[in-house]
Image (tube, grey):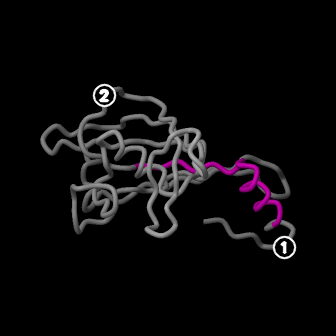
Amino acid sequence: MVFARTSKAASRLSEQVRNKEMRKKYLCIVDGKMEEPRGTFKDYLYKNERTNTSRIAKPNEKNAKEAILDYEVVKYNEEINLSVIKVDLHTGRHHQIRVQFASRNHSLYGDQKYGARGRGKQLALWAYSLSFKHPTTKEELTFEDYPEKIGSWKILED
């Protein structure tokens, strides 16, 4: 989360969000072993306002929006059949990461809406990196923070 100290800075930061210049990267834990160690998912998503869910849609479906992300496998634990994935979003659609991985049979651990594994656990999705330009100096700033290696995130331990 970013807070601006002045209204001018807030306006400039908001403009970066609108222009998709602010970047967030995520870590997630997914079910199973990914077929490829890195890749790109390109889909169209349709958001159902009534159920507050999204689904994969056909490109020509009314109100479907393009959703693109890159992923890289950080770690796979064969014993528990879970993978830790880094995700770089190119678009920011409703439940995008959750829907795109679940549609490929790799639902996020603890996902109550789109997954089956880890019921009652916290959703294993963590925004670990935020990058943007400083509103006055224009310097590129990147802030990173990783989850504590507790609960589901113990998988990160060596």
Q: Is residue 12 above or below residue 62?
A: below
Q: Residue at x 40, y 56 (%)?
A: 125
Q: Quadrant of residue 66?
A: top right
Residue drawn at 60 percent across, 47 percent down: 65
Q: Please tell me which residue lies in front, 34 or 46.
A: 46
Instruction: Tell me, yes or no, whether the highlighted magenta stretch contains residue 107.
Output: no
Q: Is residue 125 above or below residue 78?
A: below
Q: Between marks 1 and 2, how big is the CA–CA gap?
A: 47 Å
Tell me where residue 104 appears, x and y as whole percent: 34, 39
Residue most extreme to the bottom: 6
Q: Which secondary structure lies at badge 1?
A: helix
Q: At which x and y percent is residue 119?
A: 22, 64
- Quadrant where the N terminus sits is bottom right
Q: Amino acid at mark 2?
A: Glu
Q: Magenta segment range?
A: 11-27
**Viewer-proximal residue, 111 or 60?**
60
Whether pointer 1 and pointer 2 mark residues with C-beta atoms closer than 8 Å, the reply is: no
Give the image location of residue 144, x and y in percent: 53, 52
Q: Is residue 49 above or below residue 62?
A: below
> What's the mark number on residue 138?
none
Circle 1 packing at 10 Å, graded few (<14), some (14-19), many (20+), is few
Figure quadrant of the C terminus: top left
Name the outermost residue toward the top.
36
Taking the image as shown, residue 69 lies to the left or right of residue 112, namely: right
Upstream in sequence: badge 1 or badge 2:
1
Query: Along the line of sight, which residue is nearer the eye, 39 or 77?
Result: 39
- Check disc 1 and give the amino acid type: Ser
Of circles 1 and 2, the one toward us is 2
Residue 35's tag is 2
The residue at which mark 1 appears reads as 7
Q: Residues within 10 Å of mark 2 (few under 14, many from 20)?
A: few
